[in-house]
Every structure is written in structure tokens, then in C-alpha cells.
Amino acid sequence: MREPTRDQALRIYRTMHLIRRFEERVAECFAAAEIPGFIHLAVGQESVPATVCALLERDDLVGATHRGHGQVLAKGAEPRRVMAELFGRATGYCRGKGGSMHLCAMDLGVLGTNGVVGANLPIAVGTALAAQVRATRQVTVGFFGDGAANTGAAHEALNLAAVWDLPVVFVCENNLYAEFTPQAVHTKGTSIAARAAAYGMRGVQVDGNDVPALFDAAAEAVDAARSGAGPTLLEAMTYRWRGHHEGDPMAYRAKDELEAWRAKDAIPRFRAWLVERGMLAADEDERLVGAVAAEVDDATEFARRSPWPAPEAALEDVHA
Ligand SMILES: Cc1ncc(C[n+]2csc(CCOP(=O)(O)OP(=O)(O)O)c2C)c(N)n1
Ligand SMILES: [Mg+2]
């Protein structure tokens, strides 16, 4: 079993806190009508992108989803510029024109969040093919959901990646719902990872809220991709605490189900692991949580005081 080093472990733990705090703040700002459009939050699922992206290099690539703020932050995006993008401000990663679901940061290898479910996976296969052809040793991670697993685009992407042994890791954040439909209603089997056998690639299902277990599985998948051994389908079981989108009354799920998953929260679980190994003292924990809170406050204030894009800018960055 491969364990994270102290540096990696603390980075994962900090990123989990950052995503949680960031997403909770986005919920507040959305409710206050400071953020326009549709917002899908990943509170409860932080461990997955935090752990997987801790294994990536800066020039590796990530194809994110509609629930992708955490995936983008985990790849190293600045909270200020992510928040400003959500606010639609000129200082955002896409100068305020992308918003929550078209958020890319090409200098960090963030290929974009994507409002079209499953559509980021063929894009991830494309960058993986480019890396293979250019022999750059870059790895691409394509995040997707249990619902996206049933799209044609996902099937095409997984099949082609396997056939060509592409350096890609498909990470399914299985939160047990696609919009308002539980997995048991939209999928007959209980394992998406099991489909890997049919594609001829490695498949692993893991408790996504168990950071060390996920780290071990993801490390093997990233190493395999980087060394030319082809793709892996990694299914991380997790749960979203908030609605499908902000404003969703969540009438379709039982309250005790949510409570059961809150009890499996990855953050205190991983904190206990860190403390047990002497990697995190109580005062360090307090400092880290405080620094993350200050960073999110700063990002919010930055977004609020940033200018709107100029009307003329609508015609910039447009490809003809
Ligand atoms: C191609 C396509 N079909 C349908 C939708 C509407 N839609 C948005 S999110 C979603 C559910 C996606 O579920 P999942 O992949 O499990 O991701 P999660 O929302 O759980 O993170 C659907 C059906 C869409 N955006 N794109
Ligand atoms: Mg889902």
C-alpha cells in the first residue's frame, strides 16, 4: 500500500478544507444573488479531487465536470480567480465569460469544467492522445459522475483510451445520484468500475471518503498512465451533501441517508489518520483551518471588488 508523504498528506488535507470552505461560501453568495447562473456544489466529495490531484504534476491535465470547482482548485487554481470567474468578473480565469461551467485555466492544465455531462471525457482522451504522440509523459485525469457513466460520450472515450493505451485516468465521483435519480434507478449494476473489464482496462472501486485507500488506488493509476501502461477506471464512492444544484429542495432523498454519509465525512476521518501518524498537531490544524478561511474571505472580497468585463470584451477571445 502506497501512503502519502507528510507533504502530500497535508496538501490533501488543506485542499479538502479549501474546497469545503470555498463551496460553502459560493452557496452563500449564490443565495445573496451575487453569483449568476446555475451552481452545482461538491460539498461532501472534496476528498476525491484533493487526493487524485495531489498525485499530478503541474503540466498534467484535468477535464472537469459541471460539479468541478473542487477539481479546478485541487489542480492548483487560485481561489481568487475561480471566485471572480463565478462572479462573472474580468479578473476571473476566463475574464468572467466562462462562469461555473466553462471554467478553464490552460496554464494549469485545467481543460475546463463542462455543462455537457460526459463531454469532458472525449476531450481528456484527446489531450492524452496528444501527450502520447508527443511523448511528454503528461497524464490526463477525466472526472465524471455516475450519471455521466451512462452517456455515449463516456463509452466512446473509455473504449478508445483502452484501445490506444492512452495516458489517462478516468475518475468517477460516484455520489449515488444523477440529478434527482438514485443510481439504482438509472443503472442496473452496482459497480461502474466493473465495466473496465469489458473495455480491457484496469478498474478499481474504492471508498472515496477514505483518503489513504483512494491515494493508493490513484497512485497506481497515475503511475500506470505515466509509464505507458494505459488507462484506469477508478470509481470513488462518495456523496454530495447539498442539492444537485443550489435551490434543489432535495425531496427525493431520505434525511437519514444524508446523516449516514455526514458521519462518513472524509475530513475528520483523514484528520484522525494524520494525528495518529504524528503528522498534524492540534495547533497546526487550527492554523491551517484559519488560513484556509482567510484565503476564502480574501477570494470573495477580491471577486466583489473586481470590475465587470467591458462590453467590447464580448468580441475578444472568440475564434472565427
Ligand atoms: C448531455 C447532457 N445530458 C443531460 C444533462 C442534464 N444534467 C445535468 S447534471 C446531470 C446529472 C449528472 O449526474 P452525474 O454524472 O452523476 O454527476 P453529479 O451531478 O452527480 O455530479 C444531468 C442529467 C446535461 N447537462 N448534459
Ligand atoms: Mg452523480
Image (cartoon, helix red, strand yellow):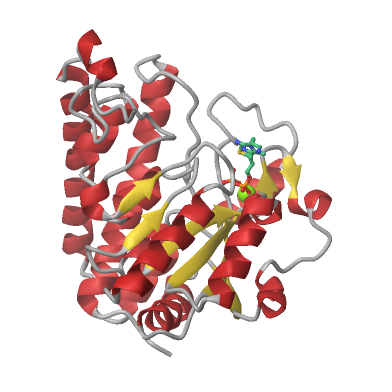
Q: x and y percent of residue 151 in the render?
A: 68, 50
Quadrant for the N terminus in the image:
bottom left
* Residue 34 picture quarter: top left
Q: Residue at x 49, y 43 (%)?
A: 67
* 200 left or right, relative to 232: right
- Rendered position, 283 above or below 87: below
* 250 left or right, relative to 43: right
**Total marks drawn?**
0
Q: Residue furthest bottom?
A: 1
Q: x and y percent of residue 191 in the render?
A: 72, 69
Q: Nearer the viewer, residue 294 or 23?
A: 23
User: Does residue 55 appear anywhere in the picture?
Assistant: no
Q: Residue furthest front?
A: 320
Q: x and y percent of residue 52 in the render?
A: 39, 67
Q: Residue at x 48, y 45 (%)?
A: 42
User: Does residue 75 appear anywhere in the picture?
Assistant: yes
- Rendered position, 314 above or below 319: above
Quadrant for the C terminus in the image:
top left
Q: Residue at x 75, y 47 (%)?
A: 182
Q: Quadrant of ligand 1?
A: top right
Q: Nearer the viewer, residue 289 or 87?
A: 87
Q: Nearer the viewer, residue 222 or 250?
A: 222
Q: Residue furthest top?
A: 311
Q: x and y percent of residue 127 in the render?
A: 39, 60
Q: Nearer the viewer, residue 108 or 318?
A: 318
Q: Residue at x 49, y 46 (%)?
A: 65
